[in-house]
Structure formats: structure tokens, C-alpha cells
């Protein structure tokens, strides 16, 4: 029953996004039920998991008092990074990164790293993904980087070649403008890293991440004044979602965004109505 319900949830998500004109929703790939439940749950209250590290950052990054914002100083010929205070070794976790596209410049990179990733280098380059201890997505070019090597574009346009926006090879190679809000999805159990843009999961960007190694969200920038905000949204263990969570997800998807606050009109017990409201 759980498998059948999970499949139905996937089909409902596909149906609900099919009418969107967003290029990213046309490039979306099916998500696991674990990730779908997280993305459709209320964010947890901000805590230390939403903080940039006050120790592990380039001296050219200045943190706000709340530690959720990191601002790069206007320094020339320097690539600078900052990583999250808290990393993970297991579970599926989602962070939100806010980074104004007008404040990125070249070599704006988001990804994950171990505690040994360098966070400052001379010149302008892709810092996250420059070594074997980090994996980065360069937002201006859509390129993936690891070990100092370019691993191709993300999203993977070839994988989505059947979509109607990718009939021209030149269009498929054109970088897509990445909006301000990016969700970083780290599955430490599966060893994968992916991203959600415009509400669409774009698939696995990196796989075979080292098991049992603590990994941290990390960004790097070369633009003076770049202000990057971090927030931990939610996470879960390797256990499959509960039937209660899957049913709640299915009901909310049927209701749609505009009717999320109308659960009191459903023929459901008051306790279930309260759960639907409190979990979204």
C-alpha cells in the first residue's frame, strides 16, 4: 500500500506542475517520498543548523549578528568561501540559500564540503569544487565542479531531452538564470547532492559522496557586497515516511496551494484537520 500511495503522490505532483511555464519545472525529475514530505512540511524553527560558521570562513566574509547572513567584503583578486556551522553524516536534509542574482558576479558557487575544504584562494576561480573535499554548482554557468574538474552542466539537459523546451541543441547548452532562492538537498545516506529551484527538484547533481564523512553546506564568491543567507528547513532519517505523513501530503497536494487553509471544510476528524494545518 505504501508503494502504491507513493506512486500516486508522484503522479499528483507531476500533474500539478504540468501547467507551469517555469523552465525548471519542465526539467524536474521525480522525487523520493522522503524528500516530498520534507518539501511539503513546515520549516523547523531556525537554530544553529541555520548558522554560518563564525570560525570556518574566509576573512573577507563578515557574518551578521544572527549568523544567518554572510557578506563578502569588496576585495579584489580573491575567491572566498563560508561554510555552515553544522554538518551532517546521515539522513536527508534540506537547506534554503538566498542569494540575489544581481549580487553574484562570476564564480558564484553553492554546494557541500568536508571540514578540510579551503575557504580562501588568490585570484578569481571556482573555490567550492576546486579540490577533492568539496562539490560545487557554479550558478552563472550551471557547471558542476569537483576535484578541480568541470563535470558538465546541471540540470542535465540530455536527460531531459524529451521536454518541449529542449528541442534545439544550442538552447540546451544555454545556462539558465538561477533565481534567488535555492534549496540544497543533501542525502547523506544515499551519498547524493541535488538542488530544488522554483519548487522543482532538478535531480542528483553529485553522487558517491563519501559515507560517514561530515558534510557542510558551503558557498564561495568573488563579488564584493554579495550577501548570502542560510536557513535549515527540515530533515529526516533513513526510515521511510509514515503512512500518516504520506496521507497528509496527498491531501495537501489535492487541495493545492490556494486551498491549504480550507481543511476545515473537509469531511475529516478535527484532529486530522489540525494535523494538516500544523504540518504545512
Image (spheres, rainbow, N blue to C red):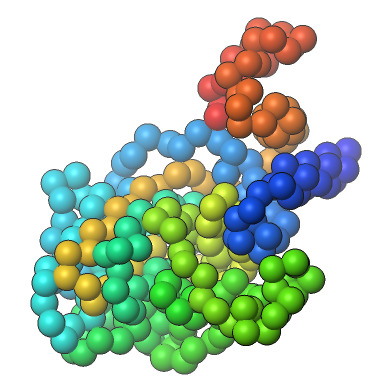
Q: In this view, does 7 lie to the left or right of 80?
A: right
Q: Is residue 54 left or right of residue 96?
A: left
Q: Which residue is drawn at 33% across and 79% down?
A: 107
Q: Residue at x 74, y 30 (%)?
A: 254
Q: Is residue 45 above or below residue 170?
A: above
Q: Is residue 23 above or below residue 76?
A: above
Please state which of residues 51 and 40 is positioned toward the viewer in this rendering.
Answer: 40
Q: Which residue is drawn at 16% across and 56% down?
A: 63
User: Can residue 238 be seen here?
Assistant: no
Q: Which residue is drawn at 46% across and 64% down?
A: 178
Please state which of residues 233 and 227 is positioned toward the viewer in this rendering.
Answer: 227
Q: How many labels does the image show?
A: 0
Q: Is residue 74 left or right of residue 37?
A: left
Q: Position of residue 122 (x, y in %)?
A: 18, 89
Quadrant position of the N terminus in the picture: top right
Q: In which quarter of the image is residue 74?
A: bottom left
Q: In this view, does 259 lie above or below 183?
A: above
Q: Where is residue 31 in the image (x, y as percent from the top left)?
A: 69, 55
Q: Position of residue 262 (x, y in %)?
A: 63, 16
Q: Where is residue 111 in the image (x, y as percent from the top left)?
A: 42, 69
Q: Is residue 232 left or right of residue 202?
A: left
User: Can residue 163 be seen here?
Assistant: yes
Quadrant position of the C terminus in the picture: top right
Please state which of residues 33 and 181 is positioned toward the viewer in this rendering.
Answer: 181
Q: In this view, does 36 lie above or below 127?
A: above
Amino acid at each position: 500500500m505504501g508503494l502504491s500511495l507513493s506512486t500516486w503522490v508522484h503522479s499528483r505532483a507531476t500533474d500539478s506542475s504540468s501547467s507551469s511555464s517555469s523552465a525548471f519545472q519542465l526539467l524536474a525529475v521525480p522525487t523520493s517520498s522522503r524528500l516530498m514530505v520534507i518539501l511539503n512540511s513546515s520549516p523547523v524553527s531556525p537554530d544553529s543548523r541555520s548558522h554560518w560558521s563564525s570560525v570556518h570562513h574566509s576573512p573577507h566574509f563578515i557574518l551578521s549578528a544572527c549568523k544567518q547572513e554572510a557578506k563578502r567584503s569588496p576585495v579584489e583578486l580573491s575567491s572566498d568561501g563560508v561554510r555552515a556551522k553544522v554538518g551532517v553524516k546521515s539522513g536527508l536534509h534540506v537547506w534554503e540559500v538566498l542569494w540575489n542574482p544581481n549580487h553574484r558576479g562570476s564564480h558564484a558557487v553553492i554546494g557541500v564540503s568536508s571540514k578540510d575544504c579551503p575557504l580562501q584562494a588568490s585570484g578569481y576561480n571556482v573555490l567550492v569544487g576546486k579540490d577533492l573535499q568539496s562539490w560545487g554548482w557554479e550558478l552563472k554557468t550551471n557547471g558542476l565542479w569537483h576535484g578541480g574538474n568541470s563535470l558538465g552542466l546541471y540540470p542535465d539537459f540530455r536527460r531531459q531531452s524529451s521536454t518541449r523546451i529542449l528541442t534545439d541543441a544550442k538552447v540546451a547548452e544555454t545556462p539558465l538564470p538561477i533565481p534567488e532562492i535555492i534549496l540544497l538537498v543533501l542525502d547523506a545516506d544515499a551519498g547524493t547532492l541535488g538542488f530544488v529551484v522554483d519548487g522543482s527538484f532538478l535531480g542528483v547533481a553529485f553522487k558517491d559522496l563519501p559515507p560517514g564523512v561530515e558534510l557542510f553546506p558551503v558557498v564561495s564568491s568573488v563579488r564584493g557586497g554579495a550577501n548570502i543567507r542560510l536557513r535549515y528547513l527540515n530533515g529526516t532519517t533513513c526510515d521511510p515516511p509514515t503512512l500518516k505523513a504520506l496521507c497528509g501530503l496527498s491531501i495537501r497536494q489535492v487541495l493545492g496551494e490556494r486551498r491549504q487553509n480550507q481543511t476545515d471544510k473537509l469531511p475529516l476528524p478535527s484532529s486530522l484537520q489540525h494535523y494538516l494545518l500544523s504540518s504545512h
